Image (cartoon, rainbow, N blue to C red):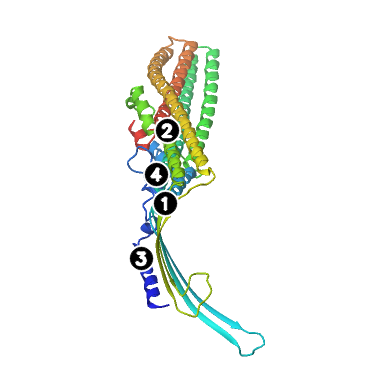
Amino acid sequence: MNASARAAVFSAGLLLCALPAHAGWRDDPLRAQPRLPDGGRLLPGDSVAAPCPPSYDAAMPLSLPAAIDLALCHNAQVRGAWAGIQLQAAGLGEARAAYLPTLNVGLSRVHDRTAYPGAASASSSLNSNTGSVSFSWRLFDFGGRAAGQRGATALLDAALANRDAVLQKTLAAAVGAYFDAQTAQATARMRREYQALAQDTVAATRRRAQRGLGSHSDTLQAESALAKAALGASRAGGEDDKARAVLIYILGLPAGAGVTVGDDADAPASGLREDLQAWLAQAQVRHPAIVAAQAQVAAARERVAVARSEGRPSMDLTANFYQNGRPNQGLSPASTRETLVGVSLNIPLFDGYARGYKVRGAQAQVAQKEAEAQETQQQTLMELVKAHAEADMALANLAASRTWLDAAQEAQASVQRKFGLGAADILEMLATQSALLEAQQERIRCQGEWRAARLRLLASAGVLGREAIAGR
């Protein structure tokens, strides 16, 4: 290989070696990968992604934000959604690469020996070192590359919106399991308190019987109420254990891990008292399903532009250098150098009407995606309207249940004092205890309904982020 060929190859090598050395640039030189921290675990609406907890202390009550972090760190669907983003980012990088030139270098050494039959010493041999450098750059294509890049960007936006949907689904499952465990824990605690109250009633009934103020039937009725309370406490304990097991599974903790959820059932909820129109406007802008559907429509429209541009002229710049012949050609004993530089214009004239049908197909896909996006938006907003009405009703029921519980507690305390003084019988005592139990059960039920309605409202509006839940 002569000096000119070596210089061309050396220049190409310098071009490659001149690239920045750090691995991040080599992995994504065209900046197609979105910059999301912690493998894409940043929730929509949040400013930062919380780090994965190094461990969980079972002795401490588990807060809702900690449960969310554990679920997001251990969920396989979150990792799959992040992989989908990387796939679409690779497509965007490929679309951006269409704007850059291509450079290829080829080197070969060939030894050719020819022997002639019948002549012992008649033979010939030829050694050849060949090299080639090829350069190609598309200069103009009537917008095909631009449309391809815009379409790839839209698909990446759709993948990001799908990631938001997966994150919200995971978060909703974790929050729902946390609320179920919280409700089951409160129910079990209430049942144990009711059992202790029934035990106190049995003891008071026995003291009354010893003083001659009550009959044996009063004691039997109190003991029967105690047995019923013990059965209710046992069942509530089983439901509590089951709810904890589901929560442990969703959070990705070991099967035998102990979990105690925090008790924030009476936390203020004034932050959700917003006008329905404000919720609807927020959902149209932020809901992942609507954003993803709109991005799919944008990508379909760009595919129409790509299909049209494929039937239009394009212009390419090419440059080639060959040393000692072109690749895959026969060897020549003479040393040669060949340089080619050209500009080519490609004008498609006729393709059997295939291009027109391809454009029509792309336009039909646009209409299909637009119909799907409209249906998605209508369905999402309808669910939001229902969730808003349910949240208003649940909030009102929560306040009413608080009033009912306060009245039942005061009535039970009054009758209990009268029963201790002999001014009330066992039937009145058991009736007030039963009324208190009903009020407590309804209070816990209204708390569970409020948690569920609150979660559905946030999810329907597309604001189900870690910071949004903690701040509302």
Instruction: Tell me if I can see residue 54 in this picture.
Output: no
Residues 382 and 103: in front is 103
Residue type of the residue flagged with mark 4? Arg
Alpha-carbon span between mark 4 and mark 1 = 19 Å
Residue 61 vs 320, above or below: the answer is above
**On residue 290, which mark appears?**
2
**SS at mark 3 in the image:** helix
Residue type of the residue flagged with mark 3? Leu
Q: Nearer the viewer, mark 1 or mark 3?
A: 1
Query: Do the residues under discs 2 and 1 have CB atoms within 8 angstroms?
Result: no
**Along the polypeptide, which appears first: circle 3 or circle 4?**
3
**Along the polypeptide, which appears first: circle 4 or circle 2?**
4
Residues 433 and 14: in front is 14
User: Residue at 33% of width from left, 43% of height from top?
Assistant: 48
Residue 351 vs 240, above or below: the answer is below
> In the picture, which quadrant includes the C terminus?
top left
Q: Position of residue 253 (x, y in %)?
A: 48, 44
- Disc 4: which residue: 150
- Disc 1: which residue: 314
- Mark 2 nearby-residue class (10 Å; few <14, some 14–19, many ≥20): many
> In the picture, which quadrant includes the N terminus?
bottom left
Instruction: Tell me if I can see residue 432 in this picture.
Output: yes
**On residue 15, which mark appears?**
3
Residue 78 vs 194, above or below: the answer is below
Q: Position of residue 160 (x, y in %)?
A: 41, 42
- Mark 4 nearby-residue class (10 Å; few <14, some 14–19, many ≥20): some
